[in-house]
């Protein structure tokens, strides 16, 4: 399956790891797809995965440091790293004066978290799935059935919705990585 993942193809670029066996520890190459396949930049993952967050640094040739190219590259890398279950956030740093990089990051869906010493810290968080709605719906149906069986539709429905909400809440907690039980 790994042979189908690489290179990551975007509209204008081909992004491939230098070492497919060590994806998040070694650099990646960014190549142009305009026919000549020239290397136009590098991507480095900094410090590995730390508390579900991974930091990336992208170095592009000046002629490719444009808003649409920055957006394309950072969005593609976010989609790639969010395939790993343990990664919940991807972040990067850029100079506040680099308007192309700032606007490209914002268009790619990154949010500015803080500014320190002229550096803007941007990150994107993985969206969580929500099981609560599904289980409330299932609880509603089960509650109707139980209510018909015991000849009290309201009690069955209320009980089914409450049990469904509880199951959905527990499933959401499990997906977010937080502990469900005590301790």
Image (cartoon, grey):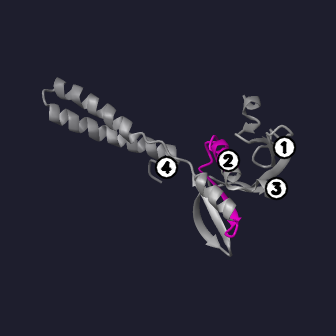
Whether label 3 touches label 4, CB < 8 Å: no
Q: Position of residue 119 (x, y in %)?
A: 68, 70
Q: Is residue 84 magenta?
A: yes
CA gap, disc 2 and disc 3 = 15 Å
CA gap, disc 3 and disc 4 = 45 Å
CA gap, disc 2 and disc 1 = 20 Å
Q: Residue at x 80, y 43 (%)?
A: 32
Q: Identify the residue under disc 4.
A: 179
Q: Residue at x 62, y 61 (%)?
A: 122
Q: Nearer the viewer, mark 1 or mark 4?
A: 1
**Residue stretch rendered in magenta on the structure:** 72-98
Q: Is residue 62 magenta?
A: no
- Whether residue 172 is situated above or below residue 49 in the rendered picture: above
- Whether residue 149 is situated above or below residue 84 in the rendered picture: above
Q: Nearer the viewer, mark 3 or mark 1?
A: 3
Q: Nearer the viewer, mark 2 or mark 1?
A: 2
* Upstream in sequence: badge 2 or badge 4: 2
* Upstream in sequence: badge 1 or badge 4: 1
């Amino acid at each position: 399956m790994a042979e189908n993942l690489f290179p990551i193809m975007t509209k204008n670029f081909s992004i491939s790891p230098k070492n497919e066996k060590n994806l998040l520890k070694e650099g990646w190459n960014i190549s142009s797809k305009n026919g000549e396949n020239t290397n136009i930049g590098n991507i480095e993952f900094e410090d590995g995965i730390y508390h579900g967050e991974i930091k990336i640094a992208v170095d592009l040739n000046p002629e490719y440091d444009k808003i649409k190219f920055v957006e394309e590259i950072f969005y593609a890398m976010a989609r790639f790293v969010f395939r790993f279950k343990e990664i919940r956030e991807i972040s990067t740093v850029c100079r506040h004066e680099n308007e192309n990089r700032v606007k490209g990051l914002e268009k790619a869906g990154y949010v500015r978290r803080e500014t320190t010493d002229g550096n803007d810290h941007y990150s994107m968080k993985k969206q969580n799935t929500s099981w609560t709605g599904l289980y409330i719906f299932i609880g509603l149906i089960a509650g109707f059935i139980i209510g018909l069986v015991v000849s009290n539709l309201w009690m069955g429905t209320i009980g089914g919705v409450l049990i469904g909400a509880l199951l959905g809440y527990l499933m959401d907690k499990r997906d977010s990585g937080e502990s469900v039980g005590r301790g």
